[in-house]
Image (spheres, rainbow, N blue to C red):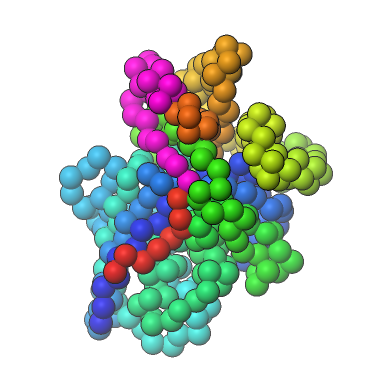
């Protein structure tokens, strides 16, 4: 029996995944596009055991000293994924395991903690079963965890999730390596509070929003425009499109039934500040995932200026500075 150690990054999407056209196989309506986050990651240590009766998960949260046994709900997701992985890998053998998971950032707060965790677990389980999957298959497996965006944490740098025609053609690939463009994501932490509705529940209701189909109708045009801006390294166009996209996704979230209001008063204050600074010539753009925390996207040359400006800003109690990094990897 063996122990594996894995490091897996969270990712922030510039073109978002919201809504599932197939919830069993976690298939999206549209392609999505993200960068891996160097300083928002999960470290996993997974030990396999002969005793198949032991299946445990311990979590050490952001800024906590000790590991604690995971809640039932999280354990259930792990067991489900373990079964999915066995089916996908065609493994008959049963194993026991102990997983120790450490987060460098708050979980369930709109910073893709489940993407980081399940992409790492996908790699970990394949190693425990002595199977080497290529990145494409690993990305498919990570997607099947239920946290679809986990598939984007597998490739290096900037990831593109191809929506695909079916389960085997829906996976993420790297469209540029980390050094391609020195973008920075300053995660402005406004709250460590865990959200009440998970994104996985939220996806299932996306279609109840009258804005969902108009969003999907226009998304290919937005995808075309952001790709062009990305390959020209045109930061202004790139930023305007990623902001437009974040607002489009949140408009769907806020108008689906029941509505999901992830933004708080502080979120809006910070957004307005970003826009105000931009009007004064200091250029950055915001995006927000399923949580109230704000991701400020800027170029590396401006990173210190934004950090210094926001570090004492009322309501922001921590800032995590992320450059673009490689994907999920085995440490040992
Ligand atoms: O992969 P999930 O089920 O955790 O959903 C992720 C959804 C968003 O983070 C809101 C958007 C995205 O594409 O990352």
160 relative to 43 in the view: left or right: right
Please state the horizontal and vertical placement of residue 291, each as a whole percent of the image: 49, 36
**Which residue sits at x=45%, y=85%?**
91
Residue 119 lies within the magenta run? no
Observer-nearest of 182 and 184? 182
Please state the horizontal and vertical placement of residue 282, each as a whole percent of the image: 54, 19
Q: As displayed, is residue 159 above or below residue 272?
A: below
**Which residue sits at x=68%, y=45%?**
231
Residue 322 lies within the magenta run? yes
Please state the horizontal and vertical placement of residue 309, each as a whole percent of the image: 41, 18
Residue at the limit of the structure toward the left, as seen here: 65
Observer-nearest of 71 and 148? 148
Q: As displayed, is residue 19 above or below residue 268?
A: below
**Which residue sits at x=62%, y=49%?**
33
Question: Which corner quadrant holds the C terminus?
Answer: bottom left
Range drawn in magenta: 304-324
Q: Is residue 292 visible?
A: no
189 relative to 229 in the view: left or right: left
């Amino acid at each position: 029996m063996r122990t594996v150690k894995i490091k897996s990054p969270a990712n922030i999407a510039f073109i978002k995944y919201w809504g599932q056209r197939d919830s069993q196989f976690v298939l999206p309506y549209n392609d999505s596009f993200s960068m891996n986050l160097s300083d928002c990651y999960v470290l996993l240590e997974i030990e396999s055991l002969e005793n198949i009766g032991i299946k445990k998960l311990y979590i050490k949260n952001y800024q906590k000293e000790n590991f604690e046994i995971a809640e039932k709900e999280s354990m259930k997701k792990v067991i489900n994924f373990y079964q999915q992985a066995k089916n996908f890998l065609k493994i008959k053998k049963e194993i026991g395991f102990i997983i120790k998971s450490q987060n460098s950032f708050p979980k369930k707060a709109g910073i893709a903690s489940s993407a980081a965790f399940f992409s790492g677990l996908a790699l970990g389980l394949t190693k425990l079963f002595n199977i080497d999957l290529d990145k494409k298959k690993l990305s498919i497996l990570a997607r099947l965890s239920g946290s679809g965006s986990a598939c984007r944490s597998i490739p290096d740098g900037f990831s593109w999730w191809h929506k695909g025609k079916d389960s085997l053609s829906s996976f993420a690939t790297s469209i540029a390596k980390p050094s391609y463009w020195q973008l920075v994501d300053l995660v402005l932490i406004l709250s460590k509070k865990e959200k009440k509705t998970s994104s996985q529940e939220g996806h299932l209701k996306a279609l109840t929003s009258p804005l969902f189909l108009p969003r999907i109708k226009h998304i290919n045009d937005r995808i075309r425009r952001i790709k062009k801006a990305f390959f020209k390294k045109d930061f202004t166009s790139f930023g305007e499109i990623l902001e437009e996209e974040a607002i489009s996704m949140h408009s769907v979230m806020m108008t689906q039934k029941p509505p999901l209001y992830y933004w708080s008063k502080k979120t809006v204050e910070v957004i307005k500040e970003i826009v105000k600074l931009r009007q004064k010539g200091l250029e950055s753009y915001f995006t927000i995932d399923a949580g109230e925390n704000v991701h400020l996207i800027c170029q590396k040359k401006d990173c210190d200026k934004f950090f210094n400006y926001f570090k004492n800003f009322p309501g922001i109690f921590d800032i995590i500075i992320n450059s673009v990094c490689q994907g999920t990897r085995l440490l040992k």
